[in-house]
Image: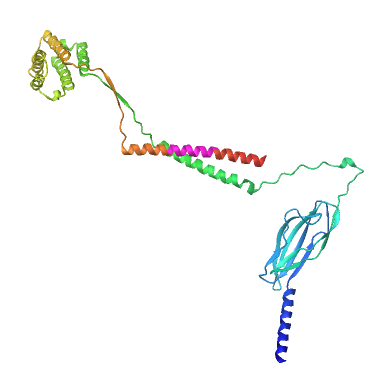
């Protein structure tokens, strides 16, 4: 009997505690205006008072959803949250509107607190029409134009950030252009070298000597120096040994192995006369000068080869630094081209987007 009384007391205490806990949740539902004109808005405020940390789930309404036939929920916003007597007070604001004249009954809004369902109180909303003066129709005014919405950051943010990217790309392109301008291009010029046969070059030089009348000049040393230098250069080009650095006897010795003996003897006389004039101050006669000039021409004609004038293209080879510089310029030019294309595309897209927003 004693244990039975104890069990009954514990159950009573639990029931009292449960009832007290249930009474701690309060749902208050009110409206700021009981009557509105057609198209106007009223604000319905639902306030829940519960313990701290309570999980509150509000009844959800989609935009333009009817809370009751004829009354739309425009939107819902969170209201104020405050602490009152150790409890948390949370509110939700529902914006309502209607376009039909009538007295509407607003049903209670359902709220879930810690998984348990609660609801507010039923409200009334009177929707009135606008009085129309049918006696003075001339005072009616046409509907106003649709007001343009103000600019919103969300509409222009994407175009703005694209513009920032566009400016950055332009700066990069300018930097690359400056690098390209400071890095001078490596210019490789292809040279075309004409290979004139040795006998033609020698005969051209002899023609210059004749045109200057050096064989009749008093300065015989200069005449024989130019004449023998021309013949030596021809021998070097024609026979392949360094005649410019050899003595006259050495040249004659090498020529006797492959040339006409008579023409070589005449050439030997030319070299001997030239050596006498240049080193022994010998004075040759005018007809002797002419004869030596003729002998030089004869020797060239007798030993010339049947080769024609040719042209050779010489392409210079780039150094390692020049090759790196050339590749660097090519890379910079490619980057500038790509950036230019991207800039043009972005610019067109940004202008089109702004036009669409403003239009």
Q: Where, by quadrant of the figure, is residue 18 drawn?
A: bottom right
- Residue drawn at (71%, 58%) of the image: 77
Q: Is residue 152 left or right of residue 74?
A: left
Q: Is residue 172 left or right of residue 137?
A: left
Q: Is residue 338 magenta?
A: yes
Q: Is residue 273 magenta?
A: no
Q: Label the magenta part by its dominant secondary structure.
A: helix
Q: Image height check: is 357 above or below 76?
A: above
Q: Is residue 177 visible?
A: no
- Residue drawn at (20%, 19%) of the image: 198
Residue 296 locus on image (x, y percent)? 15, 14
Q: Image height check: is 323 above or below 250?
A: below
Q: Image height check: is 323 above or below 118?
A: above
Q: How many marks overall?
A: 0
Residue 328 locus on image (x, y percent)? 39, 39
Q: How is the image coloured?
A: rainbow
Residue 326 locus on image (x, y percent)? 37, 36
Q: Is residue 96 left or right of residue 176?
A: right
User: Which residue is most to the top?
Assistant: 287
- Residue drawn at (65%, 42%) of the image: 357
User: Which residue is most to the bottom?
Assistant: 1
Q: Where, by quadrant of the figure, is residue 56 drawn?
A: bottom right
Q: Where, by quadrant of the figure, is residue 44 drawn?
A: bottom right
Residue 235 locus on image (x, y percent)? 15, 20
Screen quadrant of the C terminus: top right
Q: Is residue 155 visible?
A: yes
Magenta stretch bounds: 332-344
Screen quadrant of the N terminus: bottom right
Q: Is residue 40 left or right of residue 220?
A: right
């Amino acid at each position: 009997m004693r244990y039975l009384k104890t069990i009954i007391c514990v159950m009573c205490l639990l029931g009292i505690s449960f009832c007290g806990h249930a009474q701690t949740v309060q749902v208050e539902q009110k409206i700021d205006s009981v009557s509105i004109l057609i198209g106007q808005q009223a604000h319905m405020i639902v306030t829940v008072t519960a313990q701290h940390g309570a999980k509150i789930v509000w009844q959800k309404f989609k935009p333009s959803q009817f809370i009751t036939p004829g009354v739309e929920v425009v939107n819902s916003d969170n209201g104020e949250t405050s602490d009152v007597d150790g409890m948390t007070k949370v509110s939700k604001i529902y914006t309502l509107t209607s376009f039909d004249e009538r007295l509407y009954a607003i049903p209670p809004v359902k709220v879930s607190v810690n998984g348990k369902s609660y609801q507010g109180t039923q409200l009334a909303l009177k929707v009135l029409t606008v009085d129309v003066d049918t006696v003075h129709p001339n005072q009616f005014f046409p509907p106003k134009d649709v007001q343009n919405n103000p600019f919103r950051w969300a509409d222009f943010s994407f175009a703005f950030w694209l513009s920032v990217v566009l400016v950055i790309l332009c700066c990069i392109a300018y930097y690359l252009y400056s690098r390209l301008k400071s890095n001078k291009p490596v210019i490789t010029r292809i040279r075309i070298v004409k290979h004139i046969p040795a006998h033609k070059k020698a005969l051209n030089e002899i023609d210059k000597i004749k045109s200057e009348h050096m064989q009749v000049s008093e300065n015989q040393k200069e005449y024989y120096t130019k004449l023998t230098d021309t013949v030596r250069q021809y021998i070097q080009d024609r026979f392949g040994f360094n005649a410019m650095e050899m003595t006259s006897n050495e040249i004659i010795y090498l020529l006797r192995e492959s040339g006409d003996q008579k023409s070589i003897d005449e050439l030997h006389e030319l070299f001997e006369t030239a050596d006498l004039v240049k080193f022994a101050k010998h004075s040759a006669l005018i007809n002797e000068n002419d004869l030596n000039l003729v002998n030089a021409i004869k020797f060239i004609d007798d030993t010339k080869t049947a080769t024609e004038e040719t042209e050779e293209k010489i392409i210079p080879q780039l150094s390692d630094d020049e090759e790196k510089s050339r590749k660097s310029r090519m890379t910079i030019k490619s980057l500038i081209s790509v950036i230019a294309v991207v800039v043009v595309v972005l610019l067109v897209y940004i202008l089109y987007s702004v036009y669409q927003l403003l239009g």
